[in-house]
Image (spheres, rainbow, N blue to C red):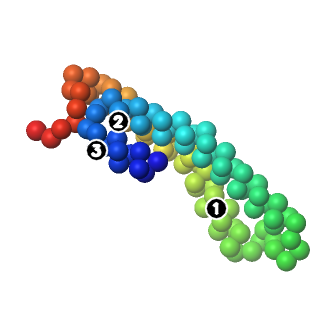
Amino acid sequence: MQFFGIRTLASGSAERLVHFAQDVEWIGSRVLTLSALGAFLSGVGLVLNASFWDFGDDWIVIGLGLFAVTFIASTGTLVGAFVGALAIAALLVLPARRTLTPS
């Protein structure tokens, strides 16, 4: 997605920027969220299956906390709302301007 973003910014097209922002919102809320959920369930399964790991281990508690932060961000409460607002703002601010060239 980084390379798509670089290409979008290099094109200078406002319409392409809006479409890219909408695509990032869609991918983040549907693809990345499900991937994170799959990784979480795999980790829980590994901890439950192993006799030498426990949910009380510090590194597992830290991992669960960081997972919670990233999961909340990827479900759209932080990232999706921002990207959606960016797309709407770009549609409102740049309708007459077709390119993003500096003046």
Q: Which residue is the extreme one toward the bottom?
A: 52
Q: Amino acid at mark 1?
A: Gly
77 relative position to 7: left or right: right
Q: Secondary structure at mark 3?
A: helix
Measure the C-alpha gap from mark 1 to mark 3.
Answer: 37 Å
The residue at which mark 1 appears reads as: 65
When asked about the image quadrant of residue 93, the answer is top left
When asked about the image quadrant of residue 68, the answer is bottom right
- Kindly check if marks 1 and 2 are in contact, taking CB atoms under 8 A apart as contact: no
Q: Which mark is residue 17?
A: 2
Which residue: 43% across, 51% down?
2
Assess disc 2: are there few (<14), some (14-19) or many (≥20) residues with their C-alpha within 10 Å of its C-alpha.
Answer: many
Which residue: 35% across, 44% down?
7
Q: Amino acid at mark 2?
A: Leu
Q: Is residue 20 visible?
A: yes
Give the percent coordinates (x, y) of residue 96. Answer: 21, 22
